[in-house]
Amino acid sequence: MTTTIIGYPRIGSHRELKFAVQKYFKKEISAEELAQTAADLRKQNWDTISGAGIDQLVSNDFSYYDTTLDTANLLNIVPKRYKDLNLSSLDEYFAQARGYQGDKGDVTALSMKKWFNTNYHYLVPEFDDDTDVKLVGTKIFDEYQEAKDQGYQTRPVVLGPYSLLRLSAFEGNRQDTDFTSALVSAYEGIFEKLADLGADWIQLDEPQLVKDQSEADLELFTDLYKPLLSNKHGLKVLAQTYFGDVRDSYDLLTSLDFDGLGLDFHEGDESLNLIESKGFPEDKVLYAGVINGKNIWKANYDQRLDLLHKLPKTNIVLSTSCSLLHVPYTLENEPQLDDKYKKYLSFAKEKLTELTDLDHILGGSGDDALKANEALFAKPRYEENQAIIDKVASLKESDFHREPSFEERAAIQKKEFDLPELPTTTIGSFPQTREVRRNRAKYKRGEITKEQYDQFNRDKIKECVEFQEKIGLDVLVHGEYERNDMVEYFGEKLDGFLFTSNAWVQSYGTRGVKPPIIWGDVNRTAPITVAESVYAQSLTDKPVKGMLTGPVTILNWSFPREDISKKESTLQIALAIQAEALDLEKNGIKIIQIDEPALREKLPLRKSDWYSRYLDWAIPAFRLVGSKVQPTTQIHTHMCYSEFGDIIDAIDAMDADVISFEASRADLTLLDTLQKTHFKTHVGPGVYDIHSPRIPSEDEVAGTIHKILKKVPLQNVWINPDCGLKTRGTTETTASLENVVAATQQVRKELAHEGR
């Protein structure tokens, strides 16, 4: 058989792209130097993939920031406000991604959303009445030619026109169907140019097809692809899907003139059934996603072979279930990790070997690889913690509910805290400066003692509390200087987690995360956050929030186990975090924030599965954490960029007292939903975009607050940034928070003048 992949990690084996882009932002390197780093990384990837024995390579899966944004720029889908800055093409691109504030003007960034059910974020392309869709960019052609010059014939990949439309925002009177003809012409131009350069295949990613498709959706898909496929200029066209199955569109896909169809056989529950019940066209190539591209566990070859024996024997290419963007580069970067763990793991480079192993086994030359894999899975991987298993099994319905009711708690807490209208706070973390990171690194290397490490953090906490009091914030935080990643920090304190040194995964742009691995049963054996929170509270009379990461987010932002259900694993984590919440309360912390930024992230892509396969256990798992605290203890939670409106009832059912969420890059339409559904939980829609270096003015923030108050009752509104401030610089954070507080005070005065 033939082997390929859908895409490969692009930030660099040691995050070289991240550091180069950040240097470019700081004007420490030129655009030419940045381009050279990017070219070096692309060559390394092609060399690695080819060296592993993969037959078909891809190009244009690289990006400085985001491939969806790349596609928009390729097709001239750039809002006028960015073009009016008159920046270089590269700086115009970054202005869309990060916003711009400088000599040429002041613009906010494009909206950002989660990429389907992953922790990756994409930039939302923006169409308006002036959008003139046409082929203007050269990136896809340049990178194809670059690979060709190095001796590699690649399959260029680009986001398909249907998913591009469905993932975009439309700001004017024109809608998606108004751009169909122009998109067909633009993509045909891509076909023609690639064919002229010598390409033989093109991969059009259409992940939107794994969501529920209406008749109108399929009609739009047909209107795009029927004319496009009628003139392929000699190219073979692969329609690539991932993250699910194409049950709604399988008949359409197999009837259209695609030359290949990429299906996910890991998350695609119906993919095998579709082929077995409907057959697969003999004139098309099946790109079979049989190696899990989203998790880091080694594949069980017997299970994969059992699947492959049920698929067509000819015209099949072995592939990954999705791009390997979602896993770390290689286990070779983890020399400190014991082989007793590593032998069960597979990162991006190792997944290449898994593909070639399966290919060799099917070809009759992979007996040794098969025997080694069978021996690995023949023995238990770890020893279970029966006490934790029994504790989860004994949970009762009452354990998932808090008393008294929300309304009663709200009245009790209003009296308890006596906060002003529009209380101000932050989401938790403050900038992780170079000194903070250096202190942590020195401690890990054994260059300073635990006492020295802790004293540095206590000094930073004191400095942070004093700053917050000085500018007038109402509810304070301790700054989280002792924490690296919000999930990794908790995982390090709990039994059942495994950690890496360099297993970075891109979250958005230059932001990488290093997810822990849930290796076994999770258990808390000692307090985690109590000392820092108690110290911070001792420095002020204002309430200081205890900061916890919620169980669903810990699961979703880790690499989860595959040997037990996500529900069972999450409940284990919830019991551990519950114990921490009760310890915080016992030690005088009266406001506890249980962050769930990733709650919606793993929501099934098909609505019919939302509750039965996820929300019916995820929401109770969150409630379990705070179910036993006193009514006087206020429970906050926080959520990141997501489309909340369609699960607003489930979010209200979390029964938190306050929820903050990212809103500054959105159009605040969620506020309409809150108003319409009479959302009871008090809310803090973000008024300051922390994913951009822009400093919002006092008037800008005040204007946002007034927009919020038109939709949400005054007594229900909190004022806060979008998210934690860990990744921001100190200077911009200071100025932005000062403006947020000043704007809030300004609005309070205006409301008092109006008698509200």
Image (cartoon, helix red, strand yellow):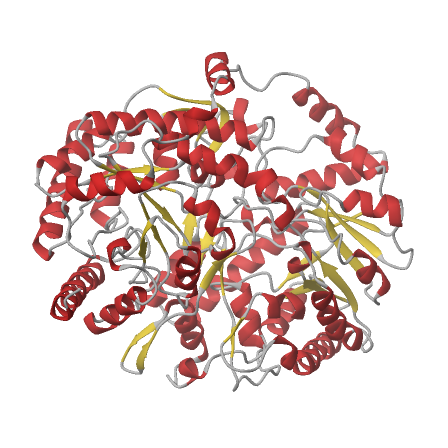
Q: Is residue 373 shown above or below 47?
A: above
- Residue 9 pos. (x, y %): 55, 52
Residue 88 image position (x, y, % from top left): 42, 80
What residue is at 63 percent from the left and 80 percent from the top? 179
Quarter holding residue 563: top right
Residue 431 appears left or right of 13: left
Out of 425 and 6, give the one closest to the viewer: 425
Height in image: 624 above or below 660? Answer: above
Q: Is residue 81 left or right of residue 423?
A: right
Q: Out of 408 and 97, give the one closest to the viewer.
A: 408
- State the residue at coordinates (19%, 70%): 698
Instruction: Report the side of 31 relative to 528 (left or right).
Output: right
The number of numbered discs placed on residues in the rendered structure image is 0
Residue 226, percent across and down? Answer: 80, 74
Residue projecting furthest to the right? 282
Quarter of the figure with residue 478 = top left
Q: At x 79% / y 56%, what residue is drawn? A: 250
Quadrant assignment for the C terminus: bottom left
Q: Is residue 159 left or right of residue 710?
A: right
In percent of the image, x 87 and y 45: which residue is there? 277
Residue 232 in view in this figure: no
Residue 446 shows up from this direction = yes
Q: Residue 319 location in percent, x, y? A: 72, 48
Q: Is residue 746 above or below residue 276?
A: below
